[in-house]
Image (tube, grey):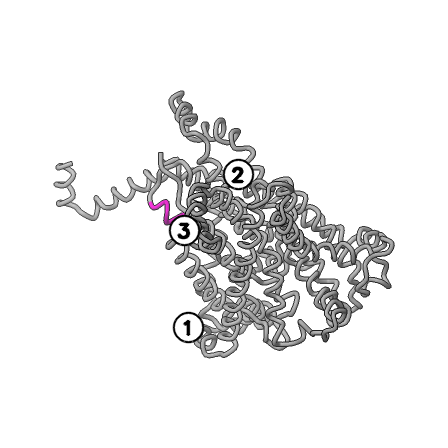
Amino acid sequence: MTLKKTSIYIILTVCLIISVFPFFWLVLTSLKPGNEVLEPTFLIMPIFDNYVNVLTDAKFLNRLGNSFFISIMTVIITVPIGCLGGYAFARLRFKKKDNYFFMLLTTRMAPPVAFGVPFYLLLSNNHLVDTYTGLISAYVFMNLAFCIWLTRGFFEEIPYELEEAAYMDGCSKLTSFIRITIPLSVGGIITTSILMFIITWNEFFFASILTRNEVATFTVHLTTFFGSRRIDWGELAAASTIVSIIPIIFAIMTRKFIVRGFSLGAVKNSK
Amino acid sequence: MSSQTDYQLTSLPNNKLVKKRRSFSRIVKNPAFLFLLPTIIVFVLLGVYPTVSAIWTSLLSYNLTEPSNVEFVFLQNYISIFKEGRFWIALWHSAQFVVTGVGLSFVIGLFIAMLLNKITRFKTFYQVGFLIPMVISPTVAAYNFKFMYNYNFGIFNSLLEKVGLERIDFLGNSATALWATVVIDIWQWTPLVILILLAGLETLPKEPYEAALIDGASPLKTFFSITIPLLKPFIIIAILIRLMDSLKVYEYIQLVTASGPGTSSETLNTYLATVGFNWFEMGSGSALGLIALNITSLLSLFLVKKTNMFKAGEEH
C-alpha cells in the first residue's frame, strides 16, 4: 500500500471513529455501574445492572410493546394503500399526474409540527387521543407519500412487456398488478416496509402530543427519565441502546437500499 | 359531433350537466381512480380536512383551557404573530440552523465520500459504520448528546479539561446552545450525504479524468471542473433532502435545550409547539402551523421544480 492510500485509510478511520463515538459512548455508559456513570472514564468491568433494571420495568416493556405494535400496524395498513397508489403513478394514465405527485411531495416536506394542532383537534374531537387508532392514523398519513414514492420506483423497473403480455391474455389491470407486478417487486416492497418501520419506530413528535399513557411509545417513555427525581443516566443509556438495536439491524439488512429509501428514490442503489 | 354542437346551442345548461356526469363516470371507471381511491380517502380525511379546519381555527381566538370562550377574530392571530419579535427571532434561528446544518454536513460529507471512493478494501465496512448514526432515533441522539454536553460530567468537557482548556457550558450559554443542537443534526445526517454522494461518485465515467491527467491538470482543477459538474445531480439531491429534513428538526432542540436558555435556541418548530401545546392556543397555533407549512413547502417546491428531480412515471 502506498503512503497516499495509507493516509486515506487513516483519515477515514478517524472520521468513522468520530461518527460512531457517540453511540459507542452510549453503550459504554449503559454498561457502567451506578457510581461510575458520571465519571468520564472508560469501562473497567461491564455490568448489566442497568439492563436488568430497565428490562424488568413493566412500564418500559409496555411502551416498547406499544412502539412495536404501532409501527407494525402502520406498515401493514400503509403498504397495500401505498402500493396501489405507487402503481397508479408508475403505470396508469390520468390527468395532471405531475401535479398530484407534487401534492404528495408537500406532505413529505412539511414539518410534522405544522400538523400538530390540527391533528390534535381532529383526534380530540373524535375522542381518539391516546388510542392506537389515533396515533396509527397520523403515522399512516405521514408515511403514505413515502411509500407511494418508493414503490413507484420499484414498479417502474419491472419490464412493461410482462404486464402487457398479461393484458393480452385478458387480465385486468388489478389482476396483472396482483399476479405480475407484486411478486416481481417483493424485494422492493419489503425494503420499503422496513424503512417505514424504522421511521415510525423512531418518531417522537406525534407520539408526544397524541398519547398520554395508554399507548405511549418508547420515545415518549425516554422523556420520563427527566422527571422530578434524579436523572438515572445509566438506565436511560441502557433503554436507548435497547431501542436502537432494531433499527441498526434493519439498516444493515437493507443497506443496499437505504440510500435509495432516504433519498426518496432519487438515488438508485449503488453496489 | 355536429349534432352534439346543435344540441349544445339549444340547451346549454342541461348539456353541461350531462357532460359533467359523463366525465365523472369516466373518472370513476378509470382504473387509476380505483388504484388511487384508498390514497385519496386517507389524504382527504387526514390531510385536506385537518388543513381546512386549521384555516378556520386560525381565525379564532381559541384556548383549549377555556373551551367556552371561543371567538371569531379574523386575521388577528396572524397580525399578532407577525408583530411579535419572538416569531421573527425563531425564524432567524431556523434559518441559521438550516444553513449551517446543511452547509457543514455537505462539505464534510463530500470530503468523506471522495475518500471512500478512492478505496476498495473494507469499503463496505466503512459504509455500514456510517449508517449507524442515521437510523438511531433522534430522541435517543438528542438525549445522548445532552449527556455528553453536560457541564459537570459530560465527556466533551472532560476532554476540554484534559487538553488544558476551560469547561464550556454548551447548553446553558445562549451563545452556544443553538450551535450545540446543530452539531447533533450534522452528526446524524452527514452519513446520508456521504452515501448519496458516494453512489454518485461510483457512476462517474473514467475518461474525463484520464484526459485531465494527460493535460496535466492539477487535482484541485480536476475536482472543480470535472467532479463537481458531473456530480451535480447527486449534489442537488443531497442538499434537497438535507434541507427538507433540517426544516423539520424538532427533537434536537426541544429535548436538548428546550429552546433555552430563555428563547436563545428557539426555532419556528419549537415555537409552534410551545404555542400549541404549552399555551394551548389553538388559534395562534393553527395560524403558525399554516405559516410554517407555507414557508417550507414553497421553499422545497421551488427547489424541486427548479431541479426537476421527482417526476411521475411514464404513461402506458
For disc 3, the marked residue is A102
Res A197 quadrant in image:
top right
For disc 1, the marked residue is B74
| Mark 3 surroundings: few (<14), some (14-19) or many (≥20) residues within 10 A | some
The stretch in magenta equals A96-103
Amino acid type of the residue tagged 2 in the rendering: Pro
Tell me, for residue A25, which label it has, or none: none
Same chain check for tags 3 and 2: yes
Amino acid type of the residue tagged 1 in the rendering: Phe
CB under 8 Å between discs 1 and 2: no
Q: Chain of mark 3?
A: A
Q: Earlier in the sequence, mark 3 or mark 2?
A: 2
Magenta stretch: dominant secondary structure = helix
Q: Eyeballing the image, is A225 above or below B260?
A: above
User: Where does the image place residue A243, in percent across and percent down from the top left?
Assistant: 71, 51
Q: Chain of mark 1?
A: B
Q: Is residue A99 magenta?
A: yes
The reply to whether residue A215 is visible in this rendering is no
Q: Nearer the viewer, mark 3 or mark 2?
A: 3
Res A249 quadrant in image:
top right
Q: Eyeballing the image, is A170 above or below A143?
A: above
For disc 2, the marked residue is A80
